[in-house]
Image (tube, coloured by chain):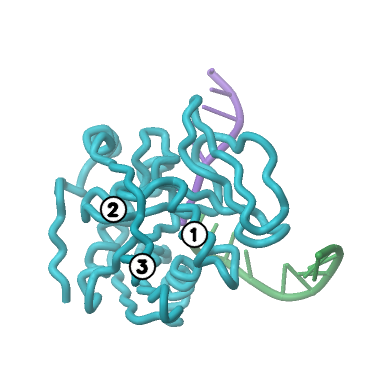
Chain colours: A cyan, B purple, C green
Amino acid sequence: MPTLDLHHAHAWDVSPTEAVAIQRELAPLVREAPLDFDAVRTVAGLDVSVRDDRVRAAVVVYDVRAKAVVDQAIWEGPTPFPYVPGLLSFREVPAILPALEQLRALPDVYMLDAQGRAHPRRFGLACHLGVLLDAPALGVAKSILVGRVEGELGEAKGSGAPLVHKGETVGVALRTRERVKPVYVSVGHRVTLRDAGRLALRLAVKYKLPQPTHLAHRLSYRGEL
DNA sequence: GCGACAG
DNA sequence: ATCTTGTCGC
């Protein structure tokens, strides 16, 4: 059971207004850095499902070299915060942290089923978790929160097009499967957009979502793999 | 003021 | 996110 050491810890029992203030306070702490792929052995996929006022966070640790799940955990509890576009982390992080504490060991990279910097205040769920743990994190979302895809996105697997918001490239629309709707990848923390896209594409071998996120979604929704 | 809006 | 069967297309 790893002991999570939270950097920049803060209260979670806050109002939407206070939540926005916290995001503006932490957003400047997001760092972009190249990912040392040779040092990446495990990537954790995270997802949270909701049913009957209860949230269930699931974590699946995927070994990139063995191409297999090496650990998993689930945590369920009361829904702590309503769903408010732009404030998703205040609803999901309180469930994700206790789930992570159940792992045998923490992963090298965190992959979230949400946005990172492709957020109105450049501080989506992937950034929030990344900054709190001060670890590499990226967001792989199924739809757009803010911004628009510029240019044409090819139909071939691996095609990409920038996701731009207010003149700033905040992410990339990435086609992980031919003729299938793309996923939207963005920086969470300590990774570059380029590397985040590479990792997402590399791990999306069977479904449009990368294996870690796909499996975490399955575990969260069904309660088992 | 009106519409958009991760999960 | 969740409610839910079959159906069209690759």
Judging from the image, mark 2 belongs to the subunit labelled: A
- Amino acid, disc 3: Ala
Q: Position of residue A31 (x, y in %)?
A: 28, 42
Q: Which residue is mark 2?
A: A129
Q: Are marks 2 and 1 in contact (CB under 8 Å)?
A: no
- Element assignment for label 1: helix
Q: Give the quadrant of residue A212.
A: bottom left
Residue at horizontal 39 percent and vertical 60 percent from the top = A111
Q: Are marks 1 and 3 in contact (CB under 8 Å)?
A: no
Which secondary structure lies at badge 2? helix
User: Height in image: A55 above or below A17?
Assistant: below
Question: Which comes before the other along the chain, label 2 or label 1?
Answer: 2
Q: Identify the image quadrant of residue A74.
A: bottom left
Along the viewing direction, whichever of A34 and A144 lies nearer the viewer? A34
* Residue on which disc 1 sits: A200
Label 3's element? Answer: strand
Quadrant in which the N terminus of chain A is drawn: bottom left
The residue labelled by disc 3 is A44
Three-letter code, disc 2? Leu
| A218 versus A196 height, above or below | below
Residue type at tag 1: Ala
* A78 with respect to A202 (left or right): left
Residue A21 in the image: state x and y as whole percent: 24, 33
Find the distance from the CA under tag 2 to the CA under tag 1. 18 Å
Q: Is label 2 on the same chain as label 1?
A: yes
Residue B5, position in %: x, y?
52, 41
Image point 51% across, 64% down: which residue?
Answer: A202
N-terminal of the two: label 1 or label 3?
3
Q: Nearer the viewer, mark 2 or mark 1?
A: 1
